[in-house]
Image (cartoon, rainbow, N blue to C red):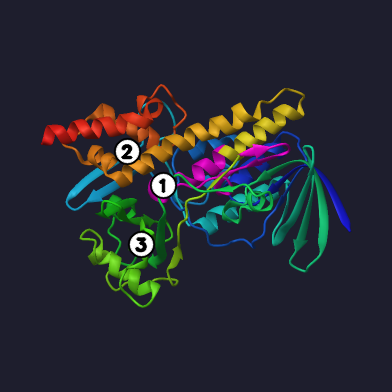
């Protein structure tokens, strides 16, 4: 059997894996990436948030992404009947990027992977991990390519960025239930033939149809737009219609804001359905490995946190391995698990309070409180580790308390 030896094996060539691999390669680490799919490939998670820009910049990938003309995202709009709340990332608490992108992920991820290869990283597509055996922190990973050829890869460390494939969670029995309510989604793309000119045509929006049901609209620079509905699994399964296309058209027709724009516009592909997508794990790391992005935890798409957690955990894994590789001591539990969990917990609170309606109370209260809005905007931009922001530090009680106060005022 063929054998290879590397310092770090990265499983998955999505944003998390590419950020980690690029960073490690730049710092002289022998890294290999294996990816089960053939790129470009369809994947959901098309709305980014500004924190990811820090990661792409640190990994040396930002310049290439800048040349591709992806649609710039300067904020996000939330709609509830005739009420509108717009967050502008340039008006947030603290420092950080004021914009990011909304992207067709097939093109975006392929750009990242090709740039990583161009830099000299050994990246193999259509190569599946079939087994992993650890001996202390060292590992031997068995992989199989599309022709059925099998080989072993010896590594000092594994970064599992396999996304929904969740390779190590499955192989090491690390799956755990999510703390977030079970929701599902139905989504597709359209040729946005009725797109208005100017900002209105390209603004990302979340249209609230019911407290727990919302429609996303994500326009791309290529003229296409992603449309999807999210709601409790019982709601999604009960949508009228024989096909997924009929069901999604039915939901779009419930939107006063978007009904006319997308009326009778055909879907480019039969809408996909993802049920009960939230997931978690028992642990984020162990001797010789870390879990990153969706291979570790996925909350909910309402605040577009998925890619942010992927790239945050990917680049942090790379930095901590490099630190340990240089002979410095790393407290993986504190420096990785506790750090990542703290950010996940902040966003999890915001997701939960969105579906209770408390966060929506804050969003749509008038007159707006600019100070509160700036602090919430910083969270929505992904700066969920900045505890100078009280809406980060006190996330577990501030939203609920403020919503309760506003409701009492109204009463």
Q: Earlier in the sequence, mark 1 or mark 2?
A: 1
- Residue 388 appears in view: yes
Q: Which residues are magenta?
A: 284-312
* CA neighbours of label 3 inside 10 A, class few (<14), some (14 to 19), many (20+): few
Give the residue furthest to the bottom: 242
Per the image, label 3 sits on a secondary structure element best described as helix
Q: On the image, numbered disc 2 is attached to which residue?
A: 88
Q: Nearer the viewer, mark 1 or mark 2?
A: 2
- The numbered mark, 3 or 2, whose residue comes first in the sequence reads 2
Query: How much space separates mark 3 and mark 1, taking CA atoms?
Result: 35 Å
* Residue 248 image label: none
Between residue 269 and residue 153, name the one nearer to us.
153
Q: Mark 1 near mark 2, Cβ–Cβ under 8 Å?
A: no
Q: Position of residue 226 (x, y in %)?
A: 40, 60
As for residue 5 lying within the magenta part, the answer is: no
Crowding at label 1, few (<14), some or many (≥20) Cα neighbours within 10 Å? some
What residue is drawn where x is 42% and y is 56%? Answer: 221
**Residue at point 34%, 51% (across, down):** 204
**Between 327 and 185, the one nearer to me in the picture:** 185
Residue topped by disc 3: 234
x, y percent for residue 263: 27, 70
Does the segment drawn in magenta span residue 303?
yes
Reading the image, the residue beneath label 1 is: 72
Distance CA(mark 3)–CA(mark 2): 34 Å
**Quadrant housing the C terminus:** top left
Q: Secondary structure at mark 2?
A: strand
Is residue 262 at least partly visible in the picture? no
């Amino acid at each position: 059997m063929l054998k290879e030896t590397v310092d770090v094996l990265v499983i998955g060539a999505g944003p998390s894996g590419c950020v980690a691999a690029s960073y490690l390669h730049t710092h002289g680490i022998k890294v290999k990436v294996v990816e089960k799919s053939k790129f470009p490939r369809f994947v959901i998670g098309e709305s980014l948030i500004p924190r990811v820009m820090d990661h792409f910049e640190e990994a040396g990938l930002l310049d290439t992404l800048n040349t591709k003309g992806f649609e710039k995202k300067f904020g996000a709009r939330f709609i509830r009947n005739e009420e509108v709340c717009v967050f502008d990332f340039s008006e947030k608490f603290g420092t950080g990027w004021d914009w990011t992108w909304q992207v067709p992920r097939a093109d975006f991820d392929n750009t990242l992977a090709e740039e990583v290869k161009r830099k000299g990283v050994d990246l193999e597509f259509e190569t599946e991990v079939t087994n992993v055996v650890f001996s202390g922190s060292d590992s031997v990973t068995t992989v199989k390519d599309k022709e059925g050829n099998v080989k072993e890869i010896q590594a000092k460390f594994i970064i599992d960025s396999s996304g929904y494939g969740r390779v190590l969670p499955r192989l090491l029995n690390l799956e755990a239930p999510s703390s977030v309510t079970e929701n599902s989604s139905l989504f597709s793309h359209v040729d946005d033939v009725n797109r208005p000119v100017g900002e209105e045509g390209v603004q990302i929006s979340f249209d609230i149809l019911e407290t727990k049901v919302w429609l996303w609209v994500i326009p791309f620079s290529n003229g296409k737009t992603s449309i999807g509905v999210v709601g409790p699994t019982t709601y999604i399964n009960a949508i009228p219609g024989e096909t997924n296309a009929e069901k999604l058209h039915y939901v779009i027709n419930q939107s006063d804001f978007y009904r006319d724009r997308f009326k009778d516009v055909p879907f480019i592909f039969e809408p996909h359905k993802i049920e009960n997508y939230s997931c978690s794990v028992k642990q984020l790391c162990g001797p010789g490995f870390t879990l990153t992005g969706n291979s570790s935890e996925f909350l909910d798409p309402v605040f577009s946190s998925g890619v942010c957690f992927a790239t945050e955990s990917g680049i942090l894994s790379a930095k901590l391995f490099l630190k340990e590789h240089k002979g410095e001591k790393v407290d993986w539990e504190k420096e990785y698990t506790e750090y990542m969990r703290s950010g996940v917990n902040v966003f999890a609170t915001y997701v939960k309070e969105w579906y209770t309606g408390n966060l929506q109370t804050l969003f749509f209260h008038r007159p707006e409180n600019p100070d509160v809005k700036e602090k919430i905007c910083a969270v929505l931009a992904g700066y969920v580790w900045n505890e100078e922001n009280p809406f980060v530090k006190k996330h577990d009680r501030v939203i609920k308390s403020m919503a309760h106060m506003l409701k009492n005022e109204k009463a």
